[in-house]
Image (spheres, rainbow, N blue to C red):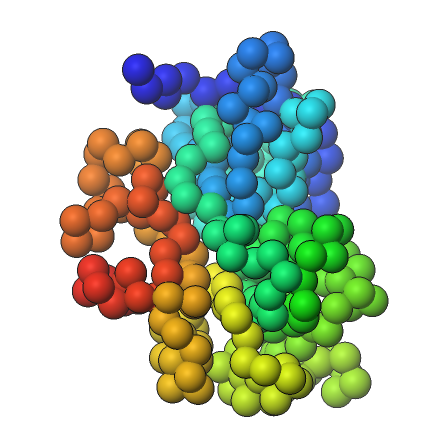
Amino acid sequence: MLNLTPVPIKIVDCYDDGENTRHYQFAIQETEQHLSPWLKAESGQFFMLCLPGVGEAPFTFTTLPNAQGNFRALVRRMGSVTDALFQCGVGDIIGARGPFGRGWPMERLLNQRILIVGGGCGIAPLASVINQLIDSQQFIQLEVVYAARNQAALMLNPERARWQHLIPIFNVVEDMAGLSDGEFYPGTATGILPKVLHTFGEQPDTVLLAGPEAMQTAAAEYLVAYGIDPKSIFLSIERRMHCAVGLCGHCYLNEKYVCSHGPTFSWAELLQYDIAC
């Protein structure tokens, strides 16, 4: 039987991290039995954040829940739920349901050449997989492209600063005002792909994409033209998810539900379903 009752979570910490964006740490306030499903969360899955009397909205994990029930999520203020969350403070209790959906294909990433491309707040669903790969060191080559409109729109700044010391990161910004050429590249995520791909000795085995769907589509089409198999390119699709369990139809795409069949899909699947971004 489906359980749609949220569990209580406490706001443990939060800080501003990009334009109208905060990075939150939550702690699940439940028994060991209720915590168990959260400990099985996978990178790329999502949860529903519940604000009593206001509503729910989906977010992905930037850090997966640990044994103490602590996890992190990047939240951009853009609606009634996030407005209400931004009015809350450290120590306040709200709710969450999850985890839901299909995460990134982690088994395909072991000992592979991996390219990860995130745009704007699309870096959020990629953060935990980047951290897992860095911690495990089970890859041949790992490079990250992060694209933003301008300096104010740059997100996950502490995480990217740490990753920069461990793996190659290409930070790309359309409006370079206030930024130095030494640390950032002018342009777009798709525009820098030729330079990034040139740094791979062999073409990437697997590519993960997340961010604006137009960006993901352009990047996927470029990568296929470059010779990468559409089955090796994975995207995270955002849609208006409501129930999160494939019942309400808010995220219906062709015969699929993003909440239960996704949010991660291979480019080959999206082309087959005729639901390319």
Relative placement, left or right, of 190 versus 139 is left
In the picture as drawn, the residue positioned furthest to the right comes out as 165
Is residue 151 visible in the rendered structure shown here?
no
Inspect this view and state whether residue 39 appears. Answer: yes
Q: Identify the residue at image location x=60%, y=70%.
A: 113
Question: Which residue extends farthest front?
Answer: 111
Q: Position of residue 119 (x, y in %)?
A: 53, 67
Quadrant including the C terminus: bottom left
The quadrant of the rendering that contains the N terminus is top left
Give coordinates of residue 100: x percent, y percent.
Answer: 42, 35
In the figure, is residue 135 to the left or right of 230? right
Which image quadrant is residue 31 in?
top right
Q: Residue at x 53, y 40 (%)?
A: 42
Compared with residue 209, is residue 184 higher up or lower down, i.e. above or below? below
Residue extending furthest toward the left: 255
Name the spot of residue 231 as percent of width and height, x first.
37, 66
Q: Quadrant of residue 195?
A: bottom right
Q: Nearer the viewer, residue 10 or 113?
A: 113
Residue at 77%, 79% in the rendered image? 183
The tally of labels here is: 0
Residue 131 lies, in percent from the top left, at 69, 52
- Residue at screen point 51% across, 57% down: 108
75 vs 84, nearest the viewer: 75
Looking at the image, residue 245 lies above or below residue 142: above
11 and 205: which is toward the camera: 205
Q: Is residue 198 above or below residue 94?
A: below
